[in-house]
Amino acid sequence: YTEQTVEERTRNAVRDIAFLEAEVKILASIECFNLNPVKFEGLIHGFLHAQRLRVTLIGRNGQAYKPKEWFSVPLDTAREVVKRIIDGSIVQYRMDNTTGRLVKKASDND
């Protein structure tokens, strides 16, 4: 989440541990309106929790850090999670922790 443009937010990525101190290639951005951005980001992080990248890295300053903003999922899965949180249908889905894909929950009638 940022109130800046994506370009402004990533401008100094090589000096920012949020971006793993690396160059950034913007693949997608999504503008969202009429929702609480902090809660929205929290929902995304919560839904993708099991896919969070679990590594400890050493920054340019020699300090260890654990990135919290990185998830190992295909881009189309990330887009679908965001879309379904926005439209409210996310409650009908779960993450397949093996494939990193969103799958529809079995209904009670199945």
Image (cartoon, rainbow, N blue to C red):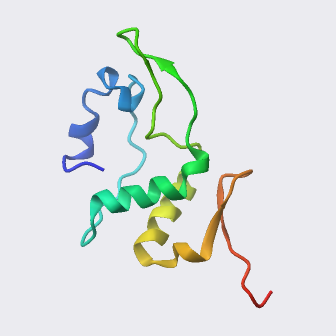
Give the x, y percent position of residue 71: 53, 43
Q: Name the image quarter holding residue 32.
A: bottom left
- Tell me the residue at 55%/42% (across/down): 52
Point 35% across, 53% down: residue: 29
Asked if residue 88 is positioned above or below residue 10 in the image, the reply reads below
Q: Residue at 29% of width from left, 35% of height from top?
A: 10
Q: Is residue 21 left or right of residue 3?
A: right
In this orientation, does residue 27 appear? yes
State the residue at coordinates (56%, 28%).
55
- Which quarter of the rendered picture does the C terminus lie within? bottom right
Q: Residue furthest top?
A: 62
Work out whether 106 lies above or below 71.
below
Percent across and percent down for residue 41 are 37, 56
Residue 74 in view: no
Q: Give the total of numbered labels.
A: 0
Instruction: Estimate the x, y position of residue 94 in percent, counting from the top left.
Output: 64, 66
Asked whether, in this view, residue 44 is left or right of residue 49, the answer is left
Quick one: which residue is furthest to the bottom in this view?
109
Front-most of residues 49 and 99? 49
Is residue 94 shown above or below 8? below
